Image: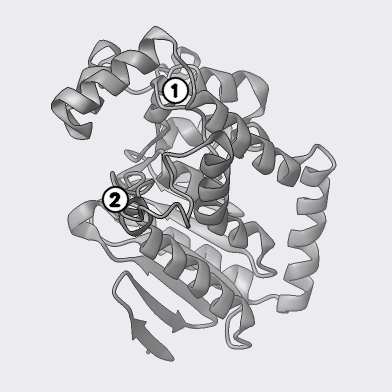
Amino acid sequence: MAKWLKHTDWITFEVREKVAYITMNRPDKRNALSPELLEEVHDAVLEADDLKAVHCIVLQGAGQDFCAGYDLGFGANPANQADTTGTYRTRIGTFDDDVWTMTRKMHKMLIIPDAHKPVIAKIQGRALAGGAELALSCDILIAADDALIGHPGTRGLGSPPINFWFYHVGPQWAKRLLLTGDSITGRDAARIGLVLDAVPAAELDAEVDTLARRIALIDPEIAAANKRIVNVAMELSGARTLQKLATEVDARAHLSQGPGRVTWKANVKQHGVRTAIKMRDEAYGTAPVRLRAFEHD
């Protein structure tokens, strides 16, 4: 039985057996990250971290996908863009405006590593772009074998402003994935360490529940100590500092006048964002990364 269940416009929040289940609830949009959804995920993680009844947190998505990326209107701020007085910043202003906007929005994901309680990402379907950033901010990732994880936006938009790729897979695989924007299946993601493990989709719920309940057996103060010491070890190689730098590098990439970026902007203007994405990705095809070394396993 659930101890309690809350619904908001964007998420559900449920506590069962000392585990808080935070569910992104935009299945019709493949749980694409709007500023409102990200705000509610942030607040839900804070609440779960505060509740004494919670020892572990599971972040998941309703429907077929964990999170297919940023909502196409994520960077826009219609209220501010409509302001003709110049009182407020806009996403389409200066380099500093871009950094400020992304920091205020995307950095809400960083509540996940900051939380004292461990957070498990349960990944089914797509975890792309902002969805991959969100998942990789979690402490442990469990994926369905056929899930797809990647950041196609690196093909022309910029670089992930929340960037934990290196800390999961090291420099070569981080570069392999970011330099192409290719996706990798959950099964192969487990082989390279991008996720902890991958299981058949039908077994994903049970696998995550079992691990979450096992973690929840531990005193949360002991769990917090263990999580935080590993995070300090990551910080010795600059994990948190890198997030600030990654956001600024992404903003700088947005200023590129190279042919790829120019073509992208022209296609967005002429055809709209959805069609521009299809045109950008056409040359890459849809096949995920192929791990030849494991083909005979």
Question: Image point 78% across, 73% down: which residue?
Answer: 222
Residue 90 visible in the picture:
yes
The residue carrying mark 2 is: 65
Q: Is residue 292 left or right of residue 201?
A: right
Specify the quadrant that holds the N terminus.
bottom left
The numbered dot on residue 297 is: 1
- Depth check, front residue: 146 or 100: 100
Is 159 situated left or right of 77 in this image? right
225 versus 27 height, above or below: below
Foreground residue among 20 and 208: 20
Which quadrant is the C terminus positioned in?
top left
- Disc 2 packing (10 Å; few <14; some 14–19; many ≥20): many
Residue under the point 73% across and 69% down: 223
Position above or below: 255 against 199? above
Q: Of the residues under marks 1 and 2, which one precedes in the sequence?
A: 2
Residue 215 occupies which quadrant of the picture? bottom right
Query: Residue 15's x, y, as percent?
Result: 46, 82
Q: Position of residue 231 (x, y in %)?
A: 76, 52
Q: Amino acid at mark 2?
A: Asp
List the single residue furthest toward the top: 259
Query: Which secondary structure lies at badge 2?
Result: loop
The correct choice, above or below, for 16 with respect to 275 in the image is below
Q: Residue at x 25, y 16 (%)?
A: 285
Note whether 114 is above or below 293 in the view shown.
below
Percent position of residue 43, x then y: 51, 73
Give the left or right position of residue 192, taking residue 271 as reference. Answer: right
Mark 1 residue element: loop
Q: Is residue 2 visible?
A: no
Kindly indicate the quadrant of the structure image that contains residue 192: top right
In front: 255, or 32? 255
Q: CA distance from mark 1 to mark 2?
A: 27 Å
